[in-house]
Amino acid sequence: MIAPVNFKSGVPVYLQIVQQVKAASASGTLRAGDALPSVRALAEELRINRNTAARAYSALETEGIIETRPGAGCFLKAQGASPLRKTVRSERLGAELDAVIVQAHHLQIADDELKTLFTERLEAFRQRQAANHETQV
Amino acid sequence: MIAPVNFKSGVPVYLQIVQQVKAASASGTLRAGDALPSVRALAEELRINRNTAARAYSALETEGIIETRPGAGCFLKAQGASPLRKTVRSERLGAELDAVIVQAHHLQIADDELKTLFTERLEAFRQRQAANHETQV
Amino acid sequence: MIAPVNFKSGVPVYLQIVQQVKAASASGTLRAGDALPSVRALAEELRINRNTAARAYSALETEGIIETRPGAGCFLKAQGASPLRKTVRSERLGAELDAVIVQAHHLQIADDELKTLFTERLEAFRQRQAANHETQV
Amino acid sequence: MIAPVNFKSGVPVYLQIVQQVKAASASGTLRAGDALPSVRALAEELRINRNTAARAYSALETEGIIETRPGAGCFLKAQGASPLRKTVRSERLGAELDAVIVQAHHLQIADDELKTLFTERLEAFRQRQAANHETQV
DNA sequence: GTGGTCTAGACCACC
DNA sequence: GTGGTCTAGACCACG
């Protein structure tokens, strides 16, 4: 259920888990009330330190994404809207897109190919979402 | 010529400089053969340590963006053919695209808006390039 | 495991470490997945500064020789296909060969002796590889 | 007569000139009594600083390779044997060969190709020598 | 003046 | 414990 983490992305491992849970919640892979794997099980599955798994859950609880019921486990809470304003979010994403465009230039990848690559990847992402939704039903 | 860096963003200062130079190079603000500010001057202007500035230039050189001639200075290289395989380059860019797509999801930005944002930014980038090319002639 | 460095050779200390790790990796003394000494341990053993050791490992990572997992340590990577184009790789090696040939000339070593030396060293390298492979089985 | 220098080889520019003059002397391109270009001419031809050219000649004079006659110019002196013992020279070259072999491994270049490349480059070097000798006669 | 290297010591995030 | 980053200050080789 939880995808492997990328150790060399620069993004902290515990944050990657946080983002995954958020994404799973957003895409419908996980729904309100669903149980998450135990800290112990998660740590074993991802081959990470238990402290790291615990920190991820701790952060998720602080953010109000999950709820831990002692003795029972962790469960997904209903998620509200993003706290950030729309314009802020768009701007943030725009900056990342700019960086990718610059990178494409240095990798000598033409605009056409960049567009193709973009739609391909977006389509692949959508299908992963759909597949997750399928298994859920 | 170099914009101030953000010390609290979590992104390493030297990487911020790398990205700025890359962007300036890609958009044509900097051209092949142009001299970059000296390590000392850059450090003073950005109020950072000389080593940090040197590290940024060093990274840019290993990426093949600039050429550094000890005792003379750093200069933007004319980019010839990339030494990397085509498939490797596509894969690298694809990975970055995936990251942006996931990020869009976390920011609760719909696919359609992501697409729009992408084409907008790409178009803006092209126009900046065209404008810089204009001033050259 | 790591031999002492020569402070007076003019060759940067961090590069000496890079070359040692490369040689150990190529000859099979170090194998994929093996852990390298920690930055702190290496610095202490070689009586160098921690930053210098870190710089060596950083260079090795950008070359794709090792993988560094912050908080965990540095590990030798299994080398997959090189990301570089074939022609680029040949050209780089050719440049190094040219340098050696010129150097032979300066050292007043005749072509025949250079050839002999070359085959001898290559044969010795192969045998070291074979020996290391032996101990693995 | 003097080949361009490589600014990014790590080898000091003035040393590259020294080595070139030595090599030219060894290969017969320059002979005892021949005049070298003036400091001024050399600096212009190689697009280097006059100080650098002067330093190269100064080093050559200190080593006894050339002789400067004030007002007349610099002239090549008869060169004696290398001051280093044979075994030392062989060992030094062997170390460089080892480094190249290791590098070939990391560039994923097979032994056969390495050998081919080596003989090709050596042959090319010989032909350059022969051509120089030709023009001299 | 230029960049390259090294030392020393500090703080941070992560396992 | 691990590596990553930054500062501060020094020395060197080179142009």
Image (cartoon, coloured by chain):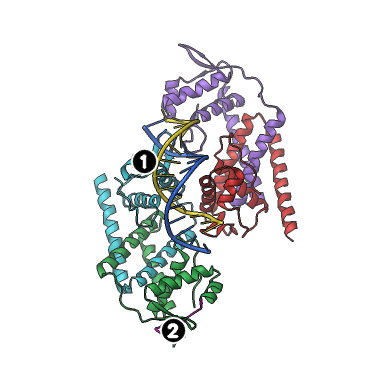
Chain colours: A green, B cyan, C red, D purple, E blue, F yellow
Q: Residue at x 54, y 54 (%)?
A: C64
Which mark identifies residue B70?
Answer: none
Do marks 1 and 2 share a subunit? no
Range of magenta residues: A31-38
Say which quarter of the image contains residue A123. Answer: bottom left
Counting from the top left corner in percent of width and height, residue D96 is at 63, 39
Residue under pointer 2? A34
Disc 1 on helix, strand or loop?
A: loop
Q: Residue at x 41, y 55 (%)?
A: A108
Question: From where the camera sits, is residue B1 visible?
Answer: yes
Residue under pointer 1? B33
> Alpha-carbon neighbours of circle 1 within 10 Å: few (<14), some, or many (≥20)?
few
Q: Amino acid at mark 2?
A: Asp
Q: Nearer the viewer, residue D60 or C50?
A: C50
> Alpha-carbon neighbours of circle 2 within 10 Å: few (<14), some, or many (≥20)?
some
Q: Nearer the viewer, residue C118 or B103?
A: B103
